[in-house]
Each structure stands twice: as C-alpha cells, then as structure tokens.
Amino acid sequence: MSYVSGLFGSAVFNDSVMKERLPKEIYQSLKRTRESGFPLEKHVATVVASVMKDWAVEKGATHFTHWFQPMTGITAEKHNAFISPAPDGKVIMEFSGRELIMGESDASSFPSGGLRATFEARGYTAWDPTSNAYVKEGTLYIPTAFCAYSGEALDQKTPLLRSMQALNFQALRVLRCLGDTTARRVDVTVGPEQEYFLIDKALWERRRDLVYAGRTLFGARPPKGQEMDDHYYGSLKQRVADFMKDVDEELWRLGVFSKTKHNEVAPAQHELAPIFETANISADHNQMTMEMLKKVAGRHGLACLLHEKPFEGINGSGKHDNWSLATDDGRNLFEPTKLPQENISFLLFIAAVMMAVDRFAPLLRLSVATAGNDCRLGANEAPPNIISLFLGDELTEILSAFEQGTEAHNCGREVMEIGVSVLPRLKKDTTDRNRTSPLAFTGNKFEFRMLGSAQSIAWPNVMLNTGVAESLREYADRLENCEDVTQEARSLLRETMRDHKRILFDGNNYSSEWIAEAERRGLPNLPTTVDAIPWLLKPEVAELFERHKVLSASELTSRYEIYLENYIKTIAIEAGTMLEMARREIVPAVIRYTAEVCATKLALKSCEMPSALEDELLGSLSALGGALGSQVALLQSRLDVLPDGDMLCVARYAQTELLPAMSALRGTADALEAVVGVSHWPFPTYGDLLYRL
Ligand code: ADP
Ligand code: MG
C-alpha cells in the first residue's frame, strides 16, 4: 500500500471500518440508513456506539464530541470523556447508543434569531450518520445536526440535508417520467475551491485588526501589489510548501480529498481544491479544511487569513462552489453526452437550473451576503452583485432552437460535431471566457463563484437545491400528467427559454454596460448585504421553503435576524478596533515622530541652519493629525449611538453611518503612514505582511 493510501481515511470510521467491525445485520441496517434514509433503529445505534467507541479508543481517543454547525458560520464542539465510574473506584470506558445519536447542550449562547425561547434554552444535537465520524487529537468527532426543542433548525446542516432531500424527491420524479427506472437516489455533488492568505504569525500578532476583525482596517498600498501577475501558479516558497504538505496529510488522515494546491493571484494568496463529494459531506469537509488551514498554519509560525478581503487594493478570497447532480447509479445529470441536443434529460435539468436562477436570483445573492463579502463582490475582482447564468454558445444555441420551434436536429451535425470531439477544449474556453460570471456551466457542472472564502457552503447550496427542486416539481407535475412525454418536455424547454432567457449572459460581467443591460432586463441588483437579506421575508420565499419543507417561516425569520445581527456586530467590532488602533497606536506614533521632527527643527534653528524639510513635514503631520483626531471623534460618536431595535434599521445605520466614517479615518491614517518614519510606525505594513514570508 502506498504511503498516501495507507494514510487516507485512517482516522475515519468509514464504510470499510464499519464493514469490518460491525455485525453483518447491523452493518446492513446502518447502510440502509446512510444510503436510503431509513430511520435508525435503537438497537443498531447501541451496537454502533460500542464498536465506534472501541475503535476510537484504539486510535487514542479519550473523549467524544457532537460536532455541529451553529449559525455562527463556524463549528462548535463540547468534549465528553468516555469514562464512567466503576464500583472499585476506577473507571470504565463507556459510550451508549443514546449518547451517539443525541446530545443536549445549552444553546443560549448560540445565535438563534429568536427561535429558542429563553425558557427553553436547551439545544439538541442529532447524529448525521451520512457523514463519517473521525478521531482528531484524542477526541471522537461525531457530525451532528443542531436544533431547538421544537425541532426548528439552529444550524447550517439541517436545512442543507432537507434541501438535498427535496431535490432528490423532485429529480427522481422527473427521471421516472423520462423513463429512468434504475436510479434510486439523486445526490447533490459539491466541490468547493478554497482561497486563503498566509502571513507570518509574529507579524499577525502585532496587528489588532487582523486579530479582532480578520482583515486589515488600515494600511497604505505598497509600491508592488499584484500588477506583475507573478504570484498566480508561481513556485511555492519552502515555508508555504511545507505548510501545504502538512495540511494535505492532516486532511487525508481525516478522509478529506484534498487534491489541488497552488498560489493564487494576489501576493501571499493560495488555493486548495478538494475532489467533489455529496453536498453535506462536502460542507462538513470544507469546515474541517478551514479549521485545519488555521491550525496547521500556527504550527508553521504562520497565520491563515480566511477573510474575504484581508487587504485593500489587492484581490480578496472567494470560494467557488462547483455543483452538480448525480444518480446513485453513477450518472451525472449535467453530462452533455455525445448528442446534447438530443439528450432531453440533460437539457431539462439545465433548463431547471436556468429557471431557478432567474426566479430566485435574490436568494442566491443573499446566500453569499456578509459584511466580509461586501468588501469584495462587485469590485472587479469578483462577480458583480447581479446574478446571471453563463451557459456558453453551444448550449444556448441548442436551447434557442427549442424556443424557436426549430427541430433540435436542425442545429445540425455542426453542433453535434462540436459536442462530440471538442468538448474538452470547449470547456476550457468557456471557463476562460466567463471568469466574470457569477454562475457558469462548466462542462458538466455549475460553478457558483460568489461565495466568500470564510463562509459555510451550506447556505448557498440550500438555495441552489431548493430553487432547482421547485423547477423540477413543476416539470414533474406537467410530465406526469401529459399524453406525450417527449412533446411535453420540448414544450417545457421552449417555455423555460422563452420566460427565463433574460438570466443568460455570456459577456463581461464586470462592465458598466452589463449593469445597464441587466437593469433593462429587469434583473435584480442587490449591491450589499443590507439590500439582500430582507428578501428572506418575502411571502413567495416562505412559500417556496415551506412547500419543500426546507425552512419554516420562523426559521427563515430567524436567519434574517441572525444574518443582519452578524453584519451589525462585524462592523461594530471593526469600528471599535479602528478606534483602539488609532488612539493607542497611531496617535502616539504620530506624536513621537512629530516630537522628533520638532526637536530636530529646534536644533537646526539653534545652529542657524535651514529647516525647510522639517517645516514641510510638520505641516503635513499637523494637518493629517488634526484630521485624524476629528475623524476618531466622529466615528466614536456614531458608534456610541448605534441604535437598538429593528435589525434592518440598525444594519442600515451601520452601513450608512459607520462604514463611511471608518473609510475616512482609514484614508487619513494611510496618508500618515506614508509620511511617518518606518521605525515609528506602530504595526507591520502591507509590505511586511505580504512579502516577508
Ligand atoms: P477549475 O477550472 O475551476 O479549477 P476544476 O475542473 O479543477 O475547475 O474543478 C474544480 C472543482 O470542481 C473540484 O473541486 C472538482 O472536484 C469539482 N467538480 C468536478 N466535477 C464535479 C461535479 N460533477 N460535481 C461537483 N463538483 C465537481
Ligand atoms: Mg473555479
């Protein structure tokens, strides 16, 4: 066995461990639960728990934890030792079926958006048997869903699982109509490409903004940014290479298919891409990846920045969510096959996505709306805030033929030829040309490119899954009740193209012409988080989510509250951090430097030497220092009266009152940085952070 295959999954309670260690009928029963969603029987849980515990103890585990994904965007864990008292005063290692499948925790410190009444502060965690348990640092990690006493979801995983279930149900209906009798399940597959920055840990520690806010809130641009394009795919520095090797090995041990690593566009920016997996497992693994990046960075004296915009003036970090649908018998529903124009199933599934993206564009937009991602989207380095869909010329042509009622084969051998022999090249072109597209068909999957690097991928996938489930539901309703399925499918393609082609855009999404064009087409443009989040409260959104049993109205409201609250708190923390840095670091530095220049000037004067340089410098220091003082006072006064109450009003206040005051303060501080001597500046500069590794 090779080193990697021996290492891969060695800390995971996966199918092969289950098969080897569980009694046969228990294994079969658990497999039915894992693969077909049959409810887990109690006696099965008891046996699984005991076997899992023995396995984990052999791997050095002393504790177990229900690992879950509250609405903080990160994960939570509370470790319990396996120990139970024995009569002889010693302990035995125990783990019951109940402990495996259910946990209770005080949920009052997790965001609930009003879901969890104060009299019922308990939260419950429930084992997700579809995602494998693993051992890490002496603890058995059990992936779980997290809900309130009422069963309402307090986490990211539950709605994701529900949306996958909804999509599976509707997709199977459509497949059956189209004559597929073998598929038993349709899975959502996701591969998230993760971008991040690496900087020196010692420098990171000296920047309060990085420590508190995860991004720089001050910092003048260095003379060199990313203009030379010399970082993308550049050879890896030794320290970075060592770090990446370590990350790969840690992830492989945990069964994460870490596959690709390279330098990204911005200096100090990198990317890790895994092989795609079922959506909820991919979401779990992406969380584990983000944690591991941070943890391993620490071991190498590095800090890993996952923020969407750690540095002003150079590219920020995103996460490309590659999304597709696959049957359990191995068919990718977005595979064009040799004759895409004759592949009605392929075309219908493409059309279903197109319809969903057009109808639910605001939901896709809001699923990536955070204060951090606001710093990046629409800034000509990332997709704009207008959702559109790129299908590529050939596919658009085929669908247009259906719309115009020309027979599909009329688009002829030409397209067929292209479809057959040049698809790989086609795919490559497509990717190249539509770098600017927020959502693109890339050969046999869709790539949603608006996600922020720090966010959970669960929420955007909930939107994609639910939206597409709705399209498929309507298709299935029609197909199940028609005389001629082929004819009806053609009508569906024609109607979808007719009604939703406005969402298709193959041009440059960064151009101002597109903004105007999108407006003419009536496509929503939601520039910021504050514009996007209120869509969660639209009646048609509640109807959609209730119909597919993905989120109840109260769960939607809770998310509205949580996302706005998160936005407000993020900005308030950033404002507070800026004030602290300005008052306690920048101002003292400016004073010290000014004093030094004054002393020099006096000394020169006493020798009757000219002091033009000093005079000019003092003029700048005095003017900028004065401006800084009043901007600090203004920001403080605005932060002091941050209103309470209606979340949307507070968020708007943060956006319109705090952000501009922060921006002004930053401008002045950055101008001071350019004037004050290097040895006086109180914290590492952009040049230090980006180039000293
Ligand atoms: P890029 O050109 O954007 O780097 P790649 O072809 O390298 O695209 O794929 C990027 C990601 O897409 C990887 O994580 C890969 O596993 C994932 N991917 C490939 N096929 C699928 C699929 N059918 N479903 C979901 N993700 C997929
Ligand atoms: Mg990509």
Image (tube, helix red, strand yellow):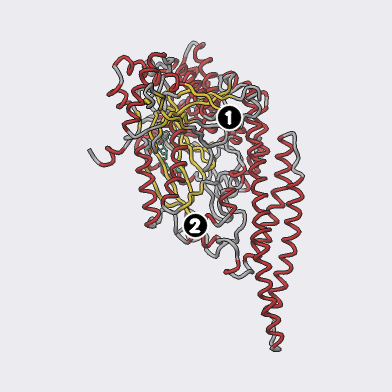
Q: In this view, does 162 lie to the left or right of 292?
A: right
Q: Where is residue 538 in the image (x, y as percent from the top left)?
A: 67, 27
Can you say whether 152 is above or below 581 in the image? Answer: above
Q: Of all residues shown, which one is farthest toward the left?
A: 1
> In this rendering, would 64 be left or right of 460?
left
In this rendering, does residue 615 appear at all? yes
Judging depth in this view, the residue of 308 and 475 nearest the camera is: 308
Q: Specify the quadrant of the image occupied by residue 613.
A: bottom right
Q: Where is residue 263 in the image (x, y as percent from the top left)?
A: 43, 52
Neighbour tally class for label 2: few under 14, some 14-19, many 20 plus, Cα within 10 Å:
few
What kind of element bears circle 2?
helix
Q: In which quarter of the image is residue 618?
A: bottom right
* Residue under the image location 49 percent in, 57 percent down: 202
Give the residue at x 74% y 60%. Answer: 629
Q: Where is residue 595 in the image (x, y as percent from the top left)?
A: 68, 73
Considering the image in quadrants, where does the C terminus appear? bottom left
Q: Which x, y percent locates residue 208?
A: 59, 53
Would you name the residue on which mark 2 appears? 202
Q: What residue type is labelled 1?
A: His
**Kind of residue sitting beneath label 2:** Ala
Nearest the eye: 583 or 284: 583
In-front residue for pair 616/120: 120
The residue singled out by tag 1 in the image is 500
Ligand 2's quadrant: top left
Farthest residue, direction bottom: 608
Secondary structure of the residue carrying tag 1 is: helix
Q: Is residue 352 visible?
A: no
Q: Which one is closest to the eye, mark 1 or mark 2?
A: 2
